[in-house]
Amino acid sequence: MSNLVTLDETIVVSRPLGEVFAYVSEFNRIDEWDPAVAKGTKTNGGKTGVGTQFRIDMKAGFSLDYTVREFEVDKRLLMDVDSNVFTAVEEITFCETPAGTSVRYLARFDFPKPLAVAHKIYPGLMNKVGKDTMEGLQRALNDNFAAPEASRALATADKLVLPGIWRFTKLGYKEAKKRWKPLSAYQRDRHAVITGATSGVGLAAAEQLAAMGASITLVARDKAKADATVRELIAATGNRQIKVEIADMSAMRDVHALADRLVKSGRPVDMLINNAGALFNPRQQTVEGFEKSFALLLLAPYILTEGLRPALAAADSPRVVNVLSGGMYSQKIRVDDLQSKRGRYSGATAYARAKRGLMILTEEWAQSWADDGIVVNAMHPGWADTPGVETALPAFYKLTRKFLRSPEEGADTAVWLATSTEAGAVTGKFWLDREQHPSHLSPLTVESSKDRQTLLQTLADLRTSTRPARKRGRPRKSA
């Protein structure tokens, strides 16, 4: 009796051949479309090709080791599969059709004799596995998902604090992930600008976008560190479309120059992720005389984003993603004290107020830039295990370390907002784990219309006064 079992399934999708191959060939993303897979991991670095290896963890409790034996771009993948349950050879072929792209999956499994006998008795089981897998792939490639709507249950849990706060941990991430849809939108003709991109959430976002094939501009303060980051990203992803822009995001002179350089390059900015941040204790001032939290977390992203508006408007589906913090829930914007000059200084409070200001900008840009097609959203990475958290909040880090997310988990929603088709249909919202959350938990933190206008005018005035070509003496430090 033969121990071989063959599966042969074909689907046709209305997507260009190159896009389909690009998605499927990154086989570590199989968990998005195969319902039997818990997680896929690319176990060696570099560009996918002959010799690339993947570990596929199955929900049934065992793992499969894949090795790419043959790799023909836009044509064919041939992979050897090894596990303690079976061995196999899987072939995926791609063909352009009048309707789009045809994908054929052909697999030959070699089972131990008892499992082969079980297949003979229940032949429909393996056939169902093959059909479910290819139906999942077809669904992913059709990419026709509605954006998640605001959930009253989530909002209620958030407002009750304790039922909602666990969502900031890695447990919340894992629970939310069960509801996620595949992310197959093509990124290889898109350009992402990421601030604070050499560590933590920013670095994780850069790596995820680079793995998707996007061109990346890393904004960093330290050239040596930035160049090392580029080398690491190329080694990990094989993507060489990564460049560096050096700018100190707490120095408005640098921020203006950065925006000017990017616009002057003539290249559209498809994705802007405003991620650079730090928490300062005690109170510190920049060389230009601004309180550092205000400068880095609010004024800098305002100047950069406003400056990049022409480059964003020139893109096909431009996105701005502002990385915020759950700490903003505790604070109301203080337009009469944006630089925390009054009372006893608290770095955590200054940080939270600046993030509250960036949430206000998110809503304002979303509304005023809608006619340009620019989608603007904000996100919370949850409690992520990053160098910044460990340094700035040592007591919090020690208490919560076992429950902190990885930087990759923290970056996921920023990447999803910047890339997914469905996220492009919603603007001006606050997100955690690809789900909408309220921007306020208490009416006590809601700013007045007058406060909003004062904030916008103050930032606009500072944008003008800090531009080097127009500056007369030192930048104005009001507010």
Image (tube, rainbow, N blue to C red):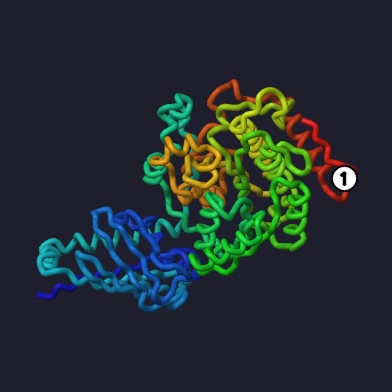
Q: In this rendering, is residue 260 above or below 1?
A: above
Mark 1 — residue?
471
Q: Name the spot of residue 106 as percent of width and height, x first.
A: 30, 72
Q: Residues within 10 Å of mark 1 (few under 14, many from 20)?
A: few
Residue 28's spot in the image, x, y percent?
Answer: 39, 62
The residue positioned 40% from the left and 56% from the top of the image is 139
The residue depicted at 68 percent of the width and 45 percent of the height is 301
- On screen, residue 91 versus residue 250, left or right, reads left
Disc 1 is placed on an element classified as: loop
Give the percent coordinates (x, y) of residue 365. 68, 41
Question: In this image, 451 relative to 70: left or right?
Answer: right
Quarter of the figure that contains the N terminus: bottom left
Taking the spot 41% from the left edge, 68% from the top edge, the residue there is 44
Comparing 363 with 379, the one in front is 379
Can the viewer see residue 367 in this picture? no
Q: Quadrant of residue 324?
A: top right
Q: Nearer the viewer, residue 14 or 18?
A: 18
Quarter placement of the C terminus:
top right
Numbered disc total: 1
Specify the amino acid type for callout 1: Lys
* Quadrant position of residue 66: bottom left
Instruction: Answer with left or right where residue 287 lies relative to residue 379.
Output: right
Residue farthest top in this picture: 444
Q: Position of residue 312 (x, y in %)?
A: 69, 53
Residue 365 in sight from this viewpoint: yes
Residue 298 is left or right of residue 146, and the answer is right
Q: Quadrant location of residue 54?
A: bottom left
